[in-house]
Amino acid sequence: MATFNNGILGGFSGTVGAVVGTTWRGVPVMRSKPKKSTKKPSPAQLRNRLKFKMMYAFMLPIKAFLNESFDQPEEKKSRFDLAKSYFLKEAMIPTADSFIIDYPKVLISKGPIRGLVDASITAQADQKALLQWTDNSALGLAYAKDVLSAIAYVPATQDFIFFEAAAQRHMGEVVLQFPEELHDLTLEVWATFKNKESKQYSTSDYLGSITVV
């Protein structure tokens, strides 16, 4: 792959002969056109493709959030790249013919500020859930006005429900209202804090699964 800024025709997008032009993080790049392989993929290759397919199906809906909340970007890796790498290594459990997601290992954020303490979530009537935690804003790297965000995943539909900036650390609890159509469905829930001034996040906490009632 080659990068260029002011070629004879400048940057381009698309295929010209055996060359493909595109951009990578805002930088014009050229690469050779990939050749189609007629070789049948091995079982290991098929399994690896399945793993990546499942990873993208889960992570793409929260890509925008992860690109803000996950660790610090490196020279050639975005926050989303780091989140994908973590997910593939830590949050997928192999089975005989597929993979399952290890929900307690999933992270929706990764950062240096202090996370939730004694967190719990309890389903309530009318599609509500009570999320509670201990106010630890007197401790280091924790501030009373840090904002809490929660994300719930619906395995049955593969949908995510976002509650961004739903409460502040000092409040100790918040009621989450879920859509009526989620009645009787099971959700997996995570929460994290963000410091608005530093724009840093805590490493998220898995709160467990609840059934909407």
Image (cartoon, grey):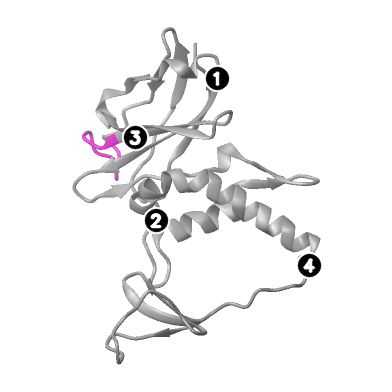
Instruction: State the residue position of label 1.
Output: 185
Task: Determine whether, in the image, residue 110 is placed left or right of residue 47.
Answer: left
**Which label is found at residue 40?**
4
For residue 10, above or below residue 137: below
Q: Which residue is outermost to the bottom? A: 8
Mark earlier in primary sequence (4, 3): 4
- Decide which of tag 4 and tag 2 comes sooner along the chain: 4
Q: Position of residue 96 (x, y in %)?
A: 81, 46
Which residue does the numbered mark 3 point to in the structure image? 149
Mark carried by residue 159: none
Secondary structure state at the residue bearing disc 2: loop
The amino acid sitting under disc 1 is Leu
Q: Amino acid at mark 4?
A: Lys
* Contact? badges 4 and 3 (CB < 8 Å): no
What separation in Å lies between label 3 and label 2 (alpha carbons)? 16 Å
Magenta part of the chain: 139-147
Assign the magenta stretch its main secondary structure. Answer: loop
Q: Position of residue 186 (x, y in %)?
A: 56, 22
Could you tell which of marks 3 and 1 lies nearer the N-terminus? 3
Residue at left offset 37%, top offset 53%: 67
> Which of pointers 4 and 3 indicates the residue nearer the eye?
4
Real-space Cα separation, disc 4 to disc 1, in angstroms:
40 Å
Q: Label 3: few (<14), some or many (≥20) within 10 Å?
A: some
Label whose residue precedes the other's in the sequence (4 or 1) = 4
Q: CA distance from mark 4 to mark 2?
A: 38 Å
Q: Position of residue 120 (x, y in %)?
A: 46, 23
Q: Nearer the viewer, residue 145 or 6?
A: 6
Q: Secondary structure at mark 3?
A: strand
- Relative height, residue 46 to residue 96 (above, below): below
